Amino acid sequence: MDRSEILSIMNLVMAKRGRPAIQSETQTTRDANFRSLDFSETALRIETKMGRELAFDAAAMRRIETVKDVLDFFQDVTKAT
């Protein structure tokens, strides 16, 4: 899944919660107001779109600080077979 698709899903989650769209990959998740629940819903939406469960590495998730990190994470896990 490409970055623009992932960001689009993230912004759908943000809109659902009445928050502004993410504007920059350099924003921290805190500054973007992207919370752990948003991360989980994004993951579920990606799984639904792909028709399969994603394999998460908990250690990699703990290193997420920016929107770029979230996009990189989901890009990596959607490439895994």
Image (spheres, rainbow, N blue to C red):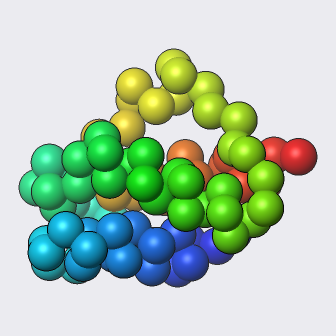
Q: Position of residue 36 (x, y in %)?
A: 30, 41
Q: Position of residue 30 (x, y in %)?
A: 14, 48
Residue 27 or residue 8, whichever sits in front: 8
Query: Which residue ends up furthest to the top in the rendered image?
Result: 59
Q: Residue at x 81, y 46 (%)?
A: 80
Q: Residue at x 53, y 52 (%)?
A: 43
Q: Which quadrant is home to the N terminus?
A: bottom right
Q: Is residue 35 left or right of residue 7?
A: left
Query: Which residue ends up furthest to the right in the rendered image?
Result: 81
Q: Quadrant of residue 8?
A: bottom left
Q: Position of residue 4 (x, y in %)?
A: 52, 79
Q: Residue at x 46, y 73 (%)?
A: 9
Q: Tell me if I can see residue 52 in this picture.
A: yes
Residue 32 or residue 51, whichever sits in front: 51
Q: Residue at x 46, y 31 (%)?
A: 61
Q: Is residue 26 left or right of residue 54?
A: left
Report how many numbered discs are placed on residues in the image.
Answer: 0
Q: Is residue 20 left or right of residue 38?
A: left
Please, is residue 9 above or below residue 39 in the view? below
Please, is residue 16 above or below residue 26 in the view? below
